[in-house]
Image (tube, grey):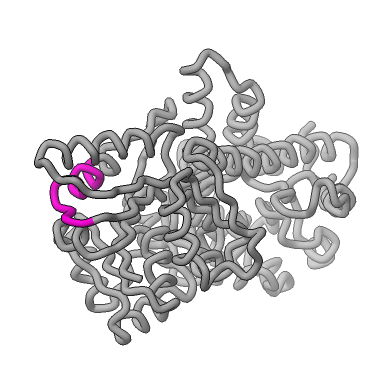
Amino acid sequence: MKVSLFGAGYVGLSFAASLAEAGHEVLCADADLARIEGLQRGLMPLHEPDLEALVAAGLAAGTLRFTADERAACLHGEVIFIVVNTPADAEGRVDLRHVMAVAAGIGRHRDRDAVVVCKSTAPVGTADQVEMVLNGELSQRGARLRVAVAANPEFLREGSAVRDCRRPDRVVIGSENPWAVEVLTRLYAPFVENPAQLLVMDRRSAELAKYAANAMLATRISFMNEMARVAEHAGADIEMVRRAIGADRRIGPDFLQAGAGYGGSCLAKDVRALKRMAERDGYPLRILTAVEATNHEQKGRLFELMTHHFEGRIAGKTIAVWGLAFKPDTDDMRDAPSLVLLERLRAAGARVQVYDPVAMSTARDLVGEHEGVRWCGAADEALQGADALALVTEWPEFSRPDFARIAQVLRSPAIFDGRNLYEAATVEAAGIAYYGIGRGRSLLR
């Protein structure tokens, strides 16, 4: 099947490469000419495991092509996906200009029937707006085409987007048009092993399903971070609590890790957008207001623990920071907890020595060059001359460090574990003070 796809971000690019691997003829378009020229040479604009090899294979096979030509992309596919960016401001207002620009372009250029699919995360009713814009353009030029607009939200996770494309746990098709449903069912056939994974519903329910899913994940994270506070004051260990409640089949083990707060391009943005949608309709979402507040406070938790450990004397200290990206296997720094920690340490007069296996360039562009920030080329380099270590992102290379060596290198041996990656007893046996999240060893007095 011929497929056009607008948007070469981590979702669009992963999806396009996966469709090409499945044998579809994919033309991926983006307005960023430099990005397209790089992709045509196999250069990745972002870090995502397995994606570079998958793109290279698609280019070599001729099943995957890239273009900045809007008209060419509008004319190529039987199915046209809109996977462009939908940024949101601090109040949750979602910018749909890119989505509507693509819809208008399809209406201007398309010369035959097509299924147009909204895959960008956007507020409920966006597919209706796309349909109106598209039909308006078709009508203006007197084109009589059969064009069906469907909603098909993505549920990819950064760091495992390719795997999630190849083996999705569900595919949601939002359409009441039998033709559109049939076309998309055929398109997804190589990825759907069990018919029960394919969920067909109306467009608005499909759009809301994306927001509801991310709101639930954010709620679980913030709930566990609140339980971590309870555990600290009760002398309990949140990791033991997590195992106990995760064994309950009604709850399950996923997204129950207490930590330094959630970040990334999805959870915070989608929680804000969902809150705004509800408020617009006169129904405030009090639970999500609390979820946001808890996450905001949690991003300052490591700094609070450091202040406690150093008895308020942070100025002049040097803190090694391992991990900057909001999660492993990505270079995404959007809403990353590390940014809050770096800013608070600098404001308190501390120096930071930072290292991340992948996100250094992205982080450096965001943070900028400051006298109090040293950008290191390796984890061990970040430790040299530091008073203490903060683990912010649980990259695999940080999972089994030599604690005896860390104890020798750090001037005031202490580890602030923002992801509960280490066992407290092991760290303490090496002569290092250990502060986790909700582990019973970091009670603020």
Identity of the residue drawn at 43% across and 29% down: 92
Q: Residue furthest bottom?
A: 60
Compared to residue 30, the image places residue 350 above or below, namely: above
Q: How many marks?
A: 0
Image quadrant in which you'd find residue 126: top left
Q: Nearer the viewer, residue 238 or 102?
A: 102
Q: Is residue 366 magenta?
A: no
Q: Residue at x 62, y 70 (%)?
A: 193
Q: Is residue 50 left or right of residue 312?
A: left
Position of 327 with respect to 445 (left or right) is left
- At which x and y percent is residue 5? 31, 60
Foreground pick, 39 / 110: 110
Instruction: Indicate the position of residue 82 as horizontal and vertical percent values.
Output: 33, 51
Is residue 261 something that shows in the picture?
yes
Give coordinates of residue 241: x percent, y percent.
Answer: 87, 47
Q: Nearer the viewer, residue 51 or 75?
A: 75
Residue name at image x 43 percent, y 73 percent? 51
Q: Quadrant of residue 444?
A: top right
Vertical order, 361 against 299 (above or below): below
Type of secondary structure dominating the magenta stretch = helix
Res. 321 visible in picture: no
In depth, the one of 410 and 120 nearer the eye is 120
Percent x, y of residue 340: 50, 41
Relative vertical location of residue 436 with respect to residue 348 in this rendering, above or below: below
Q: Which quadrant: the C terminus?
A: top right
Seen at 46% across and 18% down, the residue is: 280
Q: Is residue 296 above or below residue 42?
A: above
Judge left or right: residue 271 versus residue 109: right
Q: Quadrant of the N terminus?
A: bottom left
Q: Which residues are magenta?
A: 101-112
Q: Left or right of 63: which side holds 267?
A: right
